[in-house]
Image (spheres, rainbow, N blue to C red):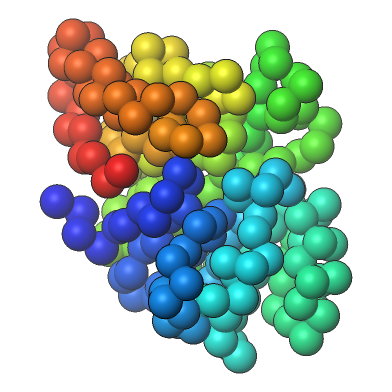
Amino acid sequence: MLDYITINDHSSIRIEAERILYFDPFRFNADFQPHDADVIFVTHDHFDHYSPEDIAKILKDETQFVAPTSTAALIAEAFPQFASQIIAVKPGDTLQVAGIDVEVVAAYNPTKEQFHPKRENWVGYVVTAEGKRHYICGDMDVTEEGKNVKCDVLLLPVGGTYTMDAKEAIELVSAIQPAYAIPTHYGEVAGGEACGSVFAEEISKAGLATEVVMKL
């Protein structure tokens, strides 16, 4: 199911469709160096989402970057030869990159601002691939902006502490009602290994039609 989507670790997502897209590349194995990224999307500056050493393993000469302003500056500093291929974005932007339609959505904690404050203008992304709209949330709790997204595939954090947890995530799924949901952002960095299973159980309890697809 959704075989063109893989999660390497945590929130490190790869979509292999019309183009090869990476989101927050993180913790690739040493022997994983495909240098095949058409577009690298980064949601924010934190170490588990912006990892220069992992980005270096997937870069090719034509790679383009999409990132919020603060992260775009870090990427330009780390990879100056790609400065002209970095697109800085903010919440509410819409654009097309490498032929892929992209919408930019605010990602923040409404009540835990010490982690992901709204003022930073960090983001999630909605990308169209394989004929489906995919919402990669980034690090966030339930927000009005998130609930207003329309998508077919929802990739959302469920690990708690820094983001919504498995039970809180049900509110977002209920609002969006995607065909599929893929839980992310749990395990070693945040939340336990069981968070994905708990999320799937909560979906079932809520009687939602969304199908949970486990990738971690």
- At x 22%, y 9%, the residue is 206
Dividing the picture into quadrants, the one containing residue 78 is bottom right
Q: Position of residue 109 (x, y in %)?
A: 66, 22
Q: Is residue 140 above or below residue 70?
A: above
- At x 57%, y 66%, the residue is 54
Left or right: residue 55 compared with residue 136 = right
Q: Position of residue 104 (x, y in %)?
A: 60, 48
In the rendered image, the residue lying farthest to the bottom is 61
Q: Position of residue 194 (x, y in %)?
A: 30, 24
Q: Is residue 202 above or below residue 134?
A: above
- At x 47%, y 64%, the residue is 28
Q: Position of residue 43 (x, y in %)?
A: 63, 48
Foreground residue, 80 or 121?
A: 80
Foreground residue, 126 or 76?
A: 76
In the rendered image, the residue lying farthest to the top is 205
Q: Is residue 113 above or below residue 18?
A: above
Dividing the picture into quadrants, the one containing residue 62 is bottom right
Q: Is residue 187 above or below residue 15?
A: above
Dividing the picture into quadrants, the one containing residue 10 is top left
Left or right: residue 36 compared with residue 180 = right
Is residue 149 at least partly visible in the picture? Answer: no
Q: How many marks?
A: 0
* Image quarter of the C terminus: top left
- At x 61%, y 90%, the residue is 61
